[in-house]
Image: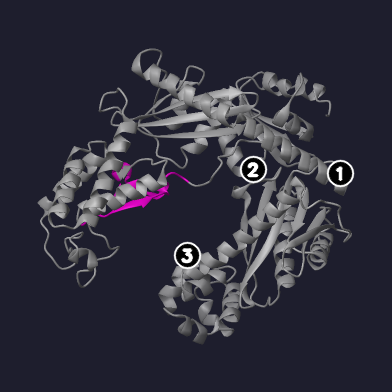
């Protein structure tokens, strides 16, 4: 560890944000502090353990920016985290957001599940979040069975099947009274807000009708729906007023592990809960603060947020612009204590598993360092390609840190149309990736993991050498049955790694993940249809340009017949050439 005593002596005792850098000048951690001097000194005095020790060993320099208030330092911290994506800052386990149910505000409304709520201008028609996606789908399906809402995306010329089975009022050709639509909306909204009486009455009525008509299979379906609703209501029952709508947060911290529990209270009911456990190097209250900022970037902000005494309610309130409350007695304090119990219970349940998993990964990393004679191996990048009958290549890159996936750092690549083989495709992807790393001073991996043997490793060495970079490379070589058989280093020497070892299994997990990622990218493109598939595969064409091309030409045939100059009226000349090359092979 470097001696920072002289530099620390110059740090002011003011609020601000600080940035830790590694030997390559890459920002690896961003934090904030009320007192910059005290916080920065704390990293380099005393005995650090776990993830904090790993950070401290990685620090080669630090910088700081003084702010006039703690709110400014929080805003600056979040801005820098988004910009640099530092490896030691906390991450949400999954970049997916919770689903919400939307009752669309249209003349003929539909009911659907939505996830990307930030794009929604009017959030008054969203209900949730639903931590259980299956429960959300069941709810939508049940309401659509009971209420004849519009089911199609666009009105058709003739009534569809839903009209004939009485699950749609035939809005495309029939005249439907506004009163009828308003009555349905009112009952559905009441149910989504927690008043289940109307829906349960309807379910019982439909079940009875089906039974009397001797349609016992349909009656059984309604019976199961009714049981699901009653079970959900029983689980949600808490002793609060019906008009309570808020989120409640508490946390438990033990030995660098932080468990965060969020209760979603809607209409006085425990609508759902969210828990996440992570390792953190920050003060627990600061880590929770950073976590909440990231969490509510993907979730709907409540009108009120209840938090424990340790959190700064004024800072949260100023940042989110909502009411933040610290309950100290009564039912809400009891609920806060319940959230704490749940947070602790989750850590108790998973503590041994978390410790064991961490130990296994650390042992595997030590074995890998020894085999490759490296001082450090944390970040690994792996690549794979996918193609359609030898054409339309795409590439994928996955990133693992300490053998854990960093899905926020995964990248997809469209590959030039003149590429006709795997090695050329791999060469292009590797060059584009590490040219960008070089030009933009991005963090380099500690190791490149190639999905393949000598040929793939040699391609990687060629590219890395051409860019004057020094990054170790290994290859996962396969046998004639396409099973990973052994591991080679960049000198094409076999590494003595048992196939039963955790190291071998972790490397295979990386290999399987990059293969899945590249294949799924290609499948997603092909699933959009022939026209969209081709356009999506052309380098330089994204959603906006694709839409403009379709608007001007309307079909692949007309695009193929068009001259490069005509194509260049919509896209740049380089992209027009790329598109013409793709189209001539069709």
- SS class of the residue under badge 2? helix
Labels 3 & 1 near each other (Cβ < 8 A): no
520 relative to 418, above or below = above
Residue 493 seen: yes
The disc label shown at residue 84, or none: 2
- Residue at 78% in and 44% down: 377
Give the quadrant of the C terminus: bottom right
361 relative to 308, above or below = below
Percent x, y of residue 303: 35, 31
Give the quadrant of the N terminus: top right
Q: Nearer the viewer, residue 235 or 301?
A: 235
Q: Residues within 10 Å of mark 1 (few under 14, many from 20)?
A: few
- SS class of the residue under badge 1? helix
- Camera-near label (2 vs 1) is 1
Task: Describe residue 251's horizontal placement relative to residue 439 as left or right.
Answer: left
Residue 106 seen: no
Residue bearing mark 3: 544
Q: Residue furthest bottom?
A: 561
Residue 116 on the magenta span: yes
Q: CA distance from mark 2 to mark 3?
A: 27 Å
Percent x, y of residue 77: 59, 33
Percent x, y of residue 34: 60, 21
N-term mark: 2 or 1: 2
N-term mark: 2 or 3: 2
**Which residues, given as a range, are shown in magenta?**
97-125
Task: Describe residue 263's horizontal placement relative to residue 55 as left or right.
Answer: left
Percent x, y of residue 248: 41, 27
């Amino acid at each position: 560890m470097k001696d920072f005593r002289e530099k620390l002596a110059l740090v002011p005792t003011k609020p601000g944000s600080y940035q830790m850098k590694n030997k390559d000048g890459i920002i690896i951690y961003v934090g904030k502090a009320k007192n910059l001097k005290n916080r920065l000194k704390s990293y380099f005095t005393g005995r650090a353990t776990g993830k904090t020790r790993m950070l401290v060993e990685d620090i080669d320099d630090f910088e700081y920016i003084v702010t006039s208030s703690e709110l400014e330092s929080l805003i600056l911290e979040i801005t820098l985290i988004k910009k640099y994506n530092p490896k030691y800052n906390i991450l949400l386990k999954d970049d997916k957001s919770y689903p919400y149910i939307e009752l669309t505000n249209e003349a003929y409304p539909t009911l659907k599940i939505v996830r990307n709520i930030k794009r929604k201008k009017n959030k008054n028609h969203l209900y949730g979040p639903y931590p259980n996606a299956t429960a959300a789908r069941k709810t939508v399906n049940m309401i659509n069975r009971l209420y004849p809402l519009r089911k199609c995306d666009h009105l058709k010329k003739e009534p569809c099947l839903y009209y004939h089975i009485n699950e749609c009022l035939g809005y495309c050709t029939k005249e439907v009274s506004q009163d009828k639509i308003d009555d349905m909306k009112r009952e559905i909204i009441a149910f989504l807000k927690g008043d289940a009486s109307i829906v349960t009455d309807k379910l019982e009525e439909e079940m009875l009708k089906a039974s009397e008509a001797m349609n016992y299979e349909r009656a059984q379906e309604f019976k199961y729906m009714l049981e699901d609703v009653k079970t959900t209501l029983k689980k949600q029952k808490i002793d609060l007023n019906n008009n309570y709508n808020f989120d409640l947060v508490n946390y438990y911290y033990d030995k660098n592990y932080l468990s965060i529990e969020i209760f979603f209270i809607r209409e006085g009911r425990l609508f759902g809960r969210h828990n996440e456990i992570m390792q953190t190097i920050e003060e627990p209250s600061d880590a929770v603060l950073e976590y909440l900022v990231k969490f509510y970037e993907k979730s709907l902000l409540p009108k009120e947020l209840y938090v424990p005494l340790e959190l700064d309610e004024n800072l949260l309130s100023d940042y989110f612009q909502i009411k933040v409350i610290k309950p100290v007695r009564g039912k809400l304090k009891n609920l806060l204590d319940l959230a704490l119990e749940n947070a602790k219970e989750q850590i108790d349940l998973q503590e041994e598993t978390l410790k064991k998993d961490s130990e296994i990964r650390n042992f595997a990393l030590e074995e890998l360092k020894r085999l490759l004679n490296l001082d450090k191996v944390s970040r690994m990048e792996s690549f794979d390609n996918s193609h359609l009958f030898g054409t339309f290549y795409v590439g994928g890159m996955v990133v693992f840190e300490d053998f854990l996936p960093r899905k926020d750092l995964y990248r997809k690549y469209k590959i030039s149309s003149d590429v006709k083989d795997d090695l050329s495709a791999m060469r292009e992807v590797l060059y584009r990736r590490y040219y960008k790393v070089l030009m933009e001073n991005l963090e380099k991996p500690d190791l490149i993991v190639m999905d393949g043997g000598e040929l793939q490793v040699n391609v990687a060495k060629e590219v890395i050498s051409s860019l004057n970079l020094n990054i170790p490379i290994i290859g996962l070589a396969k046998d004639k049955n396409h099973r990973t058989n052994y591991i080679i280093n960049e000198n094409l020497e076999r590494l003595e790694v048992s196939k039963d070892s955790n190291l071998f299994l972790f490397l295979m997990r990386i290999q399987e993940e990059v293969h899945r990622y590249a294949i799924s990218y290609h499948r997603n493109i092909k699933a959009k249809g022939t026209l969209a598939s081709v356009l999506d595969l052309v380098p330089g064409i994204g959603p906006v340009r694709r839409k403009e091309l379709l608007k001007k030409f309307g079909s692949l045939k007309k695009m193929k017949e068009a001259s490069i100059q005509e194509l260049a009226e919509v896209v740049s000349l380089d992209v027009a050439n790329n598109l013409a090359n793709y189209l001539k092979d069709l």
